[in-house]
């Protein structure tokens, strides 16, 4: 709401162009109707930004790329992928003998892109529940790939309750992974218990700082933060100067990942 008020104030002050920088796009998972009468809230947010007077949006790692189609003005969807690749290369020992893992089918495109750039294999989990019992616990089965004796690197775009992460981490241990790391773009942790995450069979959980993580880090020693401010700052500078931001979609980040 504060963002909409600020945009409206700038519009009333005759601003030539208004760019909203939203590192973590709100309600990004509500991008379609998953049941009858369900709202498409991601579209509603886009409409509110447009009505308030926004001309351009800069965001990062949208849950679904088609959200960009909800807008009638330019949207730059930046990626944390270069930062993650750099972190893997410089901070995960033995990554060359690793496997990039997606905890669900929806992340297959994401993990295959990272696996190809690192020259590694990928693995894919399927989350299922025994439909014969209403209160049956959920399980994960490995659909694609082999993690036995390898360094497993879980990659996902968002962590909220932490249930998917917990299931995937335990399943990787059961399938024989030697060590497990997790890299997630947006660490929401709105319903997650940090003590539970602390006790998971994970070496490290790495998230970006698209959301503040100071309080979460106090409750979980395994939580590390990658700083995305350089990517956001460069996109703002290039947008302001009328330069192309295509460079930001590549591996421009280099080798410096000390900002975590």
Image: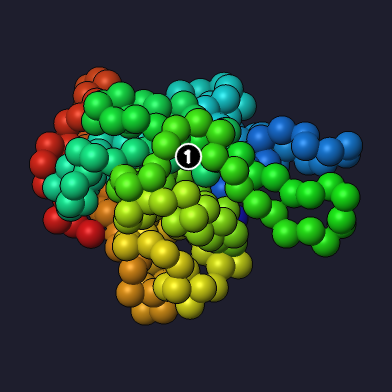
**Horizontal relation, residue 140 to residue 110: left or right:** right
At label 1, counting other C-alpha atoms closer than 10 Å, the crowd grade (few under 14, some 14-19, many 20 or more) is many
Q: How many marks on residues?
A: 1
The foreground one among 176 and 61 is 176
Q: In which quadrant of the rendered view does residue 56 lie?
A: top left
Tell me the quadrant of the picture where the C terminus can be found: bottom left
The foreground one among 103 and 253 is 103
- Residue 47 makes an appearance in the image: yes
- Residue 71 makes an appearance in the image: no
Q: Which residue is mark 1?
A: 102
- Measured as percent of width and height from the top left, residue 43 is found at 66, 34
**Horizontal relation, residue 184 to residue 11: left or right:** left
The foreground one among 56 and 133 is 133
- Measured as percent of width and height from the top left, residue 219 is found at 41, 78
Instruction: Tell me which residue sits at (64%, 44%) in the image.
Output: 127
- Measured as percent of width and height from the top left, residue 148 is found at 38, 45
Instruction: Tell me which residue sits at (59%, 43%) in the image.
Output: 141
Q: In which quadrant of the rendered view does residue 162 lie?
A: bottom right
Q: In which quadrant of the rendered view does residue 231 lie?
A: top left
Display coloring: rainbow
Q: Residue furthest left?
A: 255
Q: Is residue 38 above or below residue 225?
A: above
Tell me the quadrant of the picture where the N terminus can be found: bottom right
- Measured as percent of width and height from the top left, residue 71 is found at 57, 26
Instruction: Tell me which residue sits at (79%, 49%) in the image.
Output: 130
Q: Kindly state the secondary structure of the residue where label 1 is placed.
A: strand
Instruction: Tell me which residue sits at (57%, 25%) in the image.
Output: 66
């Amino acid at each position: 709401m504060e963002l909409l008020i600020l945009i409206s104030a700038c519009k009333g002050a005759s601003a030539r162009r208004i760019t909203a920088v939203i590192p973590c796009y709100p309600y990004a998972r509500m991008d379609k109707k998953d049941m009858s009468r369900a709202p498409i809230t991601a579209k509603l947010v886009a409409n509110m930004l447009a009505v308030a007077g926004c001309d351009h949006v800069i965001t990062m790692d949208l849950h679904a790329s088609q959200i960009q189609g909800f807008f009638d003005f330019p949207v730059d969807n930046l990626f944390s992928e270069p930062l993650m690749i750099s972190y893997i290369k410089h901070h995960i020992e033995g990554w060359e003998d690793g496997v990039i893992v997606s905890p669900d089918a929806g992340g297959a495109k994401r993990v295959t892109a990272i696996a190809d750039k690192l020259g590694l294999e990928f693995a894919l989990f399927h989350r299922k529940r025994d439909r014969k019992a209403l209160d049956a616990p959920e399980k994960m089965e490995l659909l694609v790939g082999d993690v036995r004796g390898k360094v497993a690197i879980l990659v996902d775009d968002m962590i909220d309750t932490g249930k998917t992460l917990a299931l995937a981490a335990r399943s990787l241990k059961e399938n024989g992974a030697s060590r497990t790391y997790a890299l997630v773009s947006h660490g929401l942790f709105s319903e997650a218990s940090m003590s539970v995450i602390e006790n998971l069979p994970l070496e490290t959980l790495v998230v970006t700082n698209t959301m503040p993580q100071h309080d979460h880090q106090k409750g979980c020693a395994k939580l590390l933060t990658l700083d995305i401010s350089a990517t956001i700052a460069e996109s703002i500078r290039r947008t302001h100067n009328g330069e192309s931001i295509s460079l930001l979609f590549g591996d421009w980040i280099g080798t410096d990942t000390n900002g975590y």
